[in-house]
Image (cartoon, helix red, strand yellow):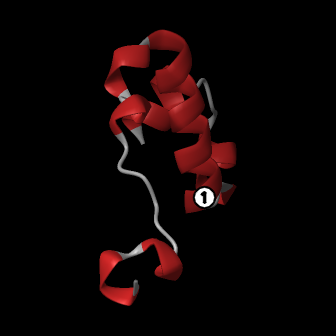
Amino acid sequence: MYVGITLLGWDIDFFIRATPNLWLKMYIVYLRQNNPEALDLEDEKPIYAMDQVPLWQ
């Protein structure tokens, strides 16, 4: 509730009606704008398909 009201600038009524998905998306946008080091997206592991796994080759 603190994050929604103070950081995101929502009022109580909007906070009560907001879905968890909307809340998470808005918080990620807030972090990207105000603290880009909080989300270290460059160190993500690559995603492999089934034909790229050594067990299947």
Closer to the camera in the image, 45 or 27: 45
Instruction: Establish if 45 lies above or below 53.
Output: above
Whole-percent x and y of residue 54? Answer: 32, 76
Instruction: Establish if 46 lies above or below 40.
Output: below
Instruction: Establish if 37 lies above or below 18.
Output: above
Specify the farthest residue to the top.
Answer: 34
Specify the farthest residue to the bottom.
Answer: 56
The quarter of the rendered structure image containing the C terminus is: bottom left
Q: Residue at x 48, y 11 (%)?
A: 34
Q: Residue at x 63, y 61 (%)?
A: 19
| Neighbourhood count class around disc 1 (C-alpha, 10 Å): few under 14, some 14–19, many 20 upward | few
Residue annotated with mark 1: 21
Whole-percent x and y of residue 23? Answer: 57, 48
Relative side of 51 to 18, left or right: left
Closer to the camera in the image, 19 or 32: 32
Relative side of 21 to 39, left or right: right
Whole-percent x and y of residue 17? Answer: 68, 58
Closer to the camera in the image, 55 or 31: 55
Quarter of the figure with residue 37: top left
Amino acid type for the residue under numbered disc 1? Asn
The quarter of the rendered structure image containing the N terminus is: top left
Q: Residue at x 38, y 76 (%)?
A: 53
Q: Residue at x 33, y 35 (%)?
A: 43
Helix, strand or loop at disc 1? helix
Q: How many marks overall?
A: 1
Whole-percent x and y of residue 38? Answer: 33, 24
